[in-house]
Amino acid sequence: MIVIIMGPPGSGKGTQAKCISEAHAFPHLSTGEMLRQEVSDNTPLGQEVAPFLRAGKLVPDELINRVMEHILKEESYRGVVLDGFPRTVVQAQQLSQTLQRLQLRLVLVVVLDVPEDVLVARLLRRAQQEGRSDDSPEPIRERMREYEMKTAPVIDYYRHASVRLQTIDGDAPIAEVTSRINVALEAAMAVTP
Ligand code: AMP
């Protein structure tokens, strides 16, 4: 069973994906966290993706698709909360094929909706707290641009596929957003065998 949490940078995807993953005992898979780990471990993959992360650019589809295909094949991912993937229509198409092949069901796509001024304020605050290299003004602008150009069309892709998609107001206290997602998820699981 697969749940996708989507939303622009700073919308709380990671935080919410963790809450949902703990509540339902699904593993949480964040492609951003995974890539940052590769960079900090200085692996060949980390060296390849580091310039993209630093600039706030998406890494190439072919690369992330290869990594995700491998990960989703693992038995432990029979159920998973995906955070930060898919981020392009090409990735979404590839994910659909992989899920079909592995007979995994996409139960729900959650889109977190947060006004842009709130997003920017959150990201700049996070920059001070966590020191992520892409949380400075220019990479933030680039990540927003990438989201609008490449990731927002994924929402339409899922709208046109027969996938359950729920937009949730993410400009609220964390626990309230989690509880809204949980309501949507319970409803989705109730109709999904
Ligand atoms: P995140 O932690 O989800 O904000 O991701 C941080 C960065 O990792 C992004 O700005 C991209 O450079 C890269 N990244 C994460 N997930 C993907 C993806 N699905 N496709 C391409 N790049 C990604």
Image (cartoon, rainbow, N blue to C red):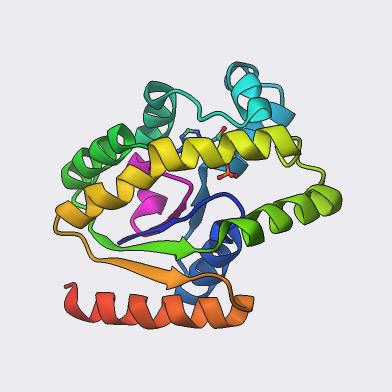
Q: Is residue 160 left or right of residue 40?
A: left
Q: Residue at x 18, y 51 (%)?
A: 103
Asked whether 77 falls inside the magenta stretch, the response is: yes
Q: Is residue 117 left or right of residue 101?
A: right
Question: Furthest residue to the right?
Answer: 128
Residue 181: name its quadrant: bottom left
The x, y position of residue 41, in whole percent, is 72, 28
Can you tell me which quadrant of the image ligand 1 is in? top right
Q: Residue at x 23, y 58 (%)?
A: 105
Quarter of the image that includes the N terminus: bottom left
Residue placed most toward the observer, 72 or 112: 112
Residue placed most toward the observer, 172 or 180: 172
The x, y position of residue 31, in whole percent, is 52, 41
Asked whether 179 falls inside the magenta stretch, the response is: no
Quarter of the image that includes the C terminus: bottom left
- Which range is magenta? 71-87
